[in-house]
Image (cartoon, grey):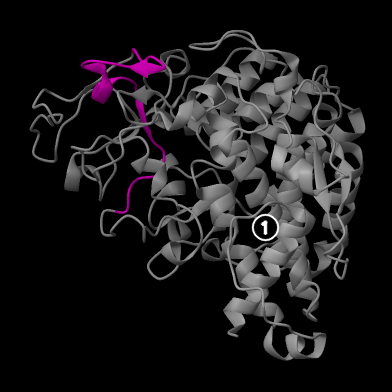
């Protein structure tokens, strides 16, 4: 039995006996006692598995990202003729019509809990203090995401009996646990020594995650009517100041944060996942290349899957001069004609020739898009989004763009929001305008909560934060393009039916 087989078998046992309903299939006929396991399995390789498992949970477009973006006013997954129907899962996400049996609801729950198990398993095999701290950070991150999406999270301590169902933390318990964990491990986490090492869990990543928790605590505890404790807001402000002291800057070229060499260029990225040849395509799930593949047309270079779009109402929140809206990018546009940011209208190749669709019509991306595109609109409906400039020197699945979890610009906006919620709109406005000027946008004259939410949308579009933001600002149930007003039950995703069946401690969320 190989070491890799042992690792996968351990994960299957954990998943099938109450952590979640994983789909891995392995021969479970081999027995391994503790001393044999200790001699074969080492903490560093287990920690590597925990890092690797971030890919499926976060980089894959159908998991945490899809749940957090397609369910909002920023993104849409239209059915295009016979393509992208997938039994209506994308339409159901956008229109808030999902059920406990929705495929992505189940798969995301499982992927996040597998990440939590992978991180916890490191703690069973004598890690160094730093390895233990990194594993506990990864576990805290996945738990945060489960609470964000589902409002409760199963939890196992190292050494728990895998034959018994894990306990379940409700939101308040889970939040308290994550805060205590991050504070406990802070001293043993490494400093982020260079931008190129942002893929290693570090002190600043822990500070950033604490900011997210304190900012969202009141929303996690009462999603229908979020509250914002003054002490929590002060924690957000103080942690942001600690991040600033680490020397981060707002990157002059917005799209450098997401480029194939963002590990070298970006002085803004706090925590990432490393990608590249020999790394990206050996893990489970799609990697960063799906960020452009899921939106680009077949005739473009790279040739995509012709799927997701943004919505014209969201696109219209950007000024023409805002550099976040996109444009040419070196190493991409001069090679393929492809621009970055938002793609609308006629598309061209690198020689200025009009790109044609599969029926030899000019490829013109339209503002108009429907949940079910038909006729000419099958291939051309919708404004496309290219947040990550494609790695034109790769075969796609080995793209070198490191995936971005946490950025300093988000920390700046979190601080501004905390100041605004603390009745210090003047200080908040200064932070927001400083960011806007760096992005080429016109300074605002005033700042209120609606403008704060809109600015977060412009800065962080398609980075997986929009659902969380809309809930915190009380907007997630509102009607928007191609979605009517929603029932309050949709403030949480349901616990998948299959997981309720294997864990008696889980309780279905209200309304499902």
Residue appearing at x 78%, y 32% in the figure: 216
In this rendering, the answer to whether 473 lies above or below 84 is above
Q: Please count the marks in the image.
A: 1
Q: Quadrant where the N terminus lies?
A: bottom right
Residue 452 position within the rendered picture, expressed as x and y whole percent measured from the top left: 64, 21
Res 363 → quadrant = top left
Image position, residue 202 (x, y; %): 69, 62
Tag 1 secondary structure: helix
Q: Residue at x 46, y 29 (%)?
A: 87
Identify the residue at horizontal 88%, vertical 66% (top origin).
160
* Residue in the foreground of this view, choosing between 251 and 393: 393
Q: x and y percent of residue 358 in the render?
A: 14, 31
Q: Position of residue 49 (x, y in %)?
A: 61, 69
Q: Is residue 498 visible?
A: yes
Front-most of 172 and 450? Answer: 172
Q: Quadrant of the C terminus?
A: top right
- The answer to whether 244 is drawn above or below residue 379 in the figure is below
Which residue is pictured at 42% across the width and 24% down the height? Answer: 310
The residue indicated by pointer 1 is 115
Secondary structure mostly taken by the magenta-highlighted segment of the chain: loop
Based on the displayed image, in which of its 4 quarters is residue 92 positioned? top right
Q: Which residues are magenta?
A: 368-391
The image shows residue 23, relative to residue 436, as above or below, that is: below
Q: In the visual, does 93 lie left or right of 353?
A: right
Q: Is residue 370 magenta?
A: yes
Tell me if mark 1 has few (under 14), some (14-19) or many (20+) residues whose alpha carbon lies within 10 angstroms of its own.
many
């Amino acid at each position: 039995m190989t070491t890799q087989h042992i690792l996968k078998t351990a994960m299957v046992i954990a998943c099938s006996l109450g952590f979640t309903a994983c789909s891995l299939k392995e021969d479970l006929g081999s027995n391994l006692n503790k001393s044999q396991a200790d001699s074969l399995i080492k903490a560093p390789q287990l920690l590597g598995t925990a890092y690797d498992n971030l890919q499926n949970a976060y980089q894959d477009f159908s998991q945490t990202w899809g749940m957090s973006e397609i369910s909002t006013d920023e993104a849409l997954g239209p059915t295009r003729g016979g393509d992208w129907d997938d039994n209506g899962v994308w339409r159901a996400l956008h229109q808030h019509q999902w059920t406990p049996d929705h495929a992505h609801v189940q798969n995301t729950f499982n992927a996040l809990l597998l990440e939590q198990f992978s991180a916890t398993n490191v703690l069973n095999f004598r890690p160094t203090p730093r390895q233990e701290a990194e594993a506990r950070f990864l576990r805290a991150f996945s738990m945060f995401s489960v609470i964000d999406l589902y409002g409760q999270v199963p939890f196992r301590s190292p050494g728990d009996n895998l034959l018994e169902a894990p306990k379940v933390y409700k939101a308040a318990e889970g939040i308290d646990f994550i805060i205590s964990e991050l504070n406990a491990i802070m001293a043993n986490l490494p400093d982020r020594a260079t931008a190129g090492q942002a893929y290693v869990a570090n002190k600043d990543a822990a500070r950033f995650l604490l900011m997210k928790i304190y900012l969202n605590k009141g929303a996690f505890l009462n999603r229908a009517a979020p509250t914002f404790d003054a002490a929590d807001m002060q924690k957000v402000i103080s942690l942001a100041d600690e991040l600033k002291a680490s020397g981060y800057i707002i990157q002059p070229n917005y799209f450098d944060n997401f480029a194939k060499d963002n590990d070298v260029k970006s002085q803004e990225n706090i925590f990432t996942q490393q990608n590249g040849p020999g790394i990206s395509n050996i893990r489970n799930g799609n990697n960063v290349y799906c960020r452009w593949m899921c939106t680009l047309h077949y005739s473009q270079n790279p040739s995509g899957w012709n799927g997701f779009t943004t919505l014209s109402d969201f696109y219209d929140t950007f000024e023409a001069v805002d550099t976040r809206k996109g444009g040419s990018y070196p190493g991409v546009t001069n090679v393929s004609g492809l621009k970055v940011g938002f793609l609308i209208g006629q598309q061209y190749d690198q020689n200025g020739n009009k790109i044609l669709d599969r029926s030899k019509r000019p490829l013109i991306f339209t503002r108009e898009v429907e949940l079910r595109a038909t006729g000419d609109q099958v291939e051309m409906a919708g404004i496309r989004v290219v947040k990550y400039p494609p790695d034109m020197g790769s075969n796609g699945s080995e793209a070198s763009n490191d995936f971005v979890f946490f950025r300093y610009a988000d920390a700046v906006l979190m601080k501004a929001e905390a100041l605004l919620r603390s009745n210090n709109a003047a200080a908040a406005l200064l932070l927001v305008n400083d960011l806007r000027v760096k992005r080429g946008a016109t300074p605002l004259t005033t700042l209120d909560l609606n403008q704060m939410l809109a600015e977060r949308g412009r800065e962080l579009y398609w980075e997986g934060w929009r659902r969380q933001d809309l809930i915190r600002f009380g907007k997630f149930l509102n009607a928007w393009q191609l979605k009517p007003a929603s029932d309050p039950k949709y403030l949480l995703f349901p616990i998948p039916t299959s997981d309720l069946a294997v864990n008696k401690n889980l309780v279905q969320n209200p309304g499902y």
